Amino acid sequence: MIINNFVKIKKKHPKLPLLFCCDHASNLIPNQYKKLGLKEKILKSHIAYDIGAQTLTKKLSSIFKTNALLAKYSRLFIDLNRDMNHINLITEKSDGTEIPGNKNLPKSEKIHRINNFHQTYHNELKLTLKNMDELFCCKTALICIHSFTSSLQNKKKRPWEIGLLYRDDKSLYKPINQYLNSNSNYKIGKNKPYSGYEDVNYTMTYHGELDKRPFISIEIRNDIFLRNNYSKIEELSSKISQAIYCSQIKLGSPYNNFAKNLNLS
């Protein structure tokens, strides 16, 4: 059985070795799981998906005329940004909310979700990167797009508007951080609100660091999207795209050559 568990934006002729991915793009639950016993209000909240991340990922894919991979189902069903052995791969509670449909799962159901939803997504991501590597004759850069809440339950407001998550390879982080700090008024979190070294960054660690390619996770505080402030969202997209463009130039050959041929307007 083949399960369509991702949405792929595939350009016929991608313009540069850069792939965007969005592990928490959707709040959908497969029909047969009856919304995991959750009310619609919960499924529309941040615990089900990264609010605004899908919109930004699609916009960046369009701006850079390159490929993107987005998750089709909610992280409450299975979290694609967690290792297969992570305790919260299929979480029973999120930010204080119980997830009835994940309680007391038999081993067979866990294996089913891993094999048919988690592994197939990451196999597709791995294959897409491999094909782009071969097309451009270099390691394709990977940028993971996420969003985070302005605060968690009973906790103070997070001051950062953009979070940049990195590990030992800072080849994307440094130019993106430098550009945003020099050309915008956004408060930038360096490995905030989470650290890239924590065990909640499976995608960028597995496909980026372990595969020895340039990588970063970009987190946006989701109240920017919740306010539906379209001019603010457009400004944010513009600043981030310019920062990413700068990072491709700073990477040197062959990345800078592809980037210089790209018209961002």
Image (spheres, grey):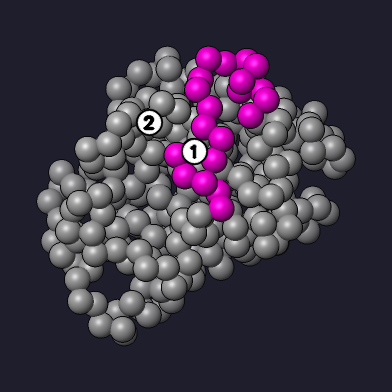
Q: Are marks 1 and 2 in contact (CB under 8 Å)?
A: yes
| The N terminus - image quarter | bottom left
Q: Is residue 57 visible?
A: no
Q: Residues within 10 Å of mark 1 (few under 14, many from 20)?
A: many
Give the residue type at disc 2: Arg
Coordinates of residue 175 in the picture (x, y in percent): 71, 30
Q: Secondary structure at mark 2?
A: loop
> How many numbered badges does the structure rendering display?
2
| The C terminus - image quarter | top right
* Numbered badge on residue 67: none
Q: Eyeballing the image, is 17 above or below 164?
A: below
Left or right of 120 in this view: 12? right
Q: Secondary structure at mark 1?
A: loop
Coordinates of residue 235 in the picture (x, y in percent): 50, 18
Q: Residue at x 78, y 58 (%)?
A: 134
Left or right of 82 in this view: 241? right
Q: Residue at x 20, y 51 (%)?
A: 96
Q: Residue at x 19, y 67 (%)?
A: 101
Residue where numbered disc 2 is placed? 158
Q: What's drawn in magenta, residue-wise?
A: 177-197
Give the residue type at disc 1: Lys
| Image quarter of residue 151 | top left
Left or right of 220 in this view: 74? left
In front here: 106 or 121? 106
Q: Residues within 10 Å of mark 2 (few under 14, many from 20)?
A: some
Coordinates of residue 142 in the picture (x, y in percent): 64, 48
